């Protein structure tokens, strides 16, 4: 690929690059932006995009990232790109109460990986943290990340779930994610806090995501489970842009928005494409595929 990022900095520059529509949205948007849980996989490039879009729009605002920052390098890099940082544990109500005011809050906190082995912690992160956030920022606009896992698998022929579909969560994480949504919905109703809940399926970039997992399996010649044969994926740059633009689309009661690619990706087709790219033989489980979309 002639335009393939040559190094990590080039990759993150692309993931944090705002488009013209976002720059205009940030020009219209009043107030500072705070990103809670900024230390995760999407947070650093989202916060950096908010900074870049605000600067391009000539909007003099603070962009603040909040996290425990278990990786100090993440904090250093954010500050190098003009994002203010605050170290705080969002499970600590006093710490959340001490955060500065911000008219626009993006809450990215959540716990997914290892959820079944740490069920209590999963529910605390996904349900208790939103309570702290909503009470502290009752007068702000809140964009809260959720997941498309709350729908459960559907037949690929349907084209995927829409926001009005009933929720059928499968597993500890998906059930806790429904709980997270209910907390934001409750406080949006009871406090009239403008809120948008983003059901994301699935952000991907060159270091993580469904496509990276498939590529590793092909390269290492490991079997690929096709029991769920289709998946929604979305380039992380687009997910970041959509999340920031959602600040203009909050409402009370809370509004739910699906954030996903326009079409489903076939794992088998992706496997073949990746196999050709890396010139590795790859192997597939012989089990018959169930045609479902996650």
Image (tube, rainbow, N blue to C red):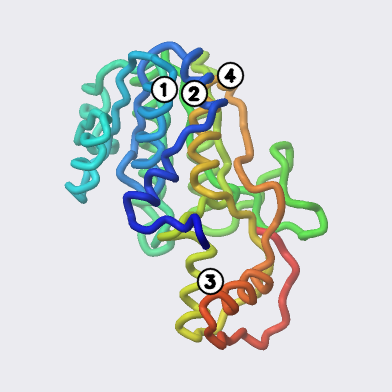
Q: For the residues carrying marks 1 and 3, which lies nearer the camera in this image?
A: 1
Mark carried by residue 56: 1
Observer-nearest of 206 and 178: 206
Query: How much space separates mark 4 and mark 1, taking CA atoms?
Result: 27 Å
Q: Residues within 10 Å of mark 4 (few under 14, many from 20)?
A: some
Q: Residue 251 shows which numbered tag?
A: 4
Q: Is mark 2 on a helix, strand or loop?
A: helix
Q: Are marks 3 and 2 in contact (CB under 8 Å)?
A: no
Marks 4 and 2 sit apart, C-alpha to C-alpha, by 22 Å
* Residue appearing at x 65%, y 49% in the figure: 151
Query: Mark 1 and mark 2: span between their CA atoms?
Result: 6 Å
Q: Would you place residue 114 above or below residue 274 in this image?
A: above
Residue behind mark 2: 23
Give the residue at the far front of this rendering.
2
Horizontal and vertical percent for residue 147?
55, 46
Q: Residue visible at 24% across and 38% down?
A: 89
**Residue 80 is drawn in which quadrant?**
top left
Q: Position of residue 220 (x, y in %)?
A: 45, 83
Give the residue number, with chain letter if any, for mark 3: 214
* Circles 4 and 3: CB atoms closer than 8 Å: no
Measured in 3D between alpha carbons, the distance from the residue under mark 4 to the one under mark 3, in whole angstroms, is: 38 Å
Q: Nearer the viewer, residue 67 or 262?
A: 262
Would residue 86 appear left or right of 234 to someone viewing this image? left
**Mark nearer the viewer, 4 or 3:** 3
Q: Are marks 1 and 2 in contact (CB under 8 Å)?
A: yes
State yes or no: discs 4 and 2 in contact (Cβ < 8 Å): no
């Amino acid at each position: 690929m002639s335009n393939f990022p040559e190094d990590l900095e080039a990759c993150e520059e692309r993931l944090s690059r705002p488009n013209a529509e976002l720059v205009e949205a940030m020009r219209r948007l009043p107030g500072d932006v705070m990103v809670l849980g900024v230390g995760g996989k999407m947070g650093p490039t989202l916060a950096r995009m908010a900074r870049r879009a605000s600067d391009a729009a000539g909007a003099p605002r603070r962009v603040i990232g909040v996290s425990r920052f278990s990786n100090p390098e993440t904090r250093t890099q954010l500050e190098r790109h003009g994002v203010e940082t605050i170290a705080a544990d969002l499970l600590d109500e006093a710490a959340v109460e001490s955060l500065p005011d911000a008219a626009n809050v993006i809450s990215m906190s959540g716990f997914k990986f290892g959820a079944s082995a740490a069920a209590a912690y999963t529910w605390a992160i996904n349900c208790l943290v939103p309570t702290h956030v909503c009470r502290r920022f009752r007068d702000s606009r809140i964009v809260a990340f959720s997941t498309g896992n709350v729908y459960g698998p559907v037949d690929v022929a349907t084209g995927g779930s829409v926001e009005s579909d009933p929720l059928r969560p499968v597993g500890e994480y998906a059930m806790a994610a429904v709980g997270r949504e209910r907390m934001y919905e409750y406080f949006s109703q009871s406090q009239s806090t403008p809120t948008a809940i983003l059901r994301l399926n699935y952000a991907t970039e060159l270091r993580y995501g469904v496509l990276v997992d498939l590529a590793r399996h092909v390269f290492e010649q490991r079997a690929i489970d096709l029991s769920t044969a289709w998946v929604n994926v979305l380039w992380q740059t687009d997910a970041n842009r959509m999340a920031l633009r959602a600040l203009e689309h909050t409402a009370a009661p809370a509004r739910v928005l699906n954030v996903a690619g326009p079409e489903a990706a076939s794992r088998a087709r992706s496997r073949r494409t990746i196999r050709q790219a890396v010139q590795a033989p790859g192997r597939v489980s012989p089990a018959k595929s169930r045609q479902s979309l996650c």
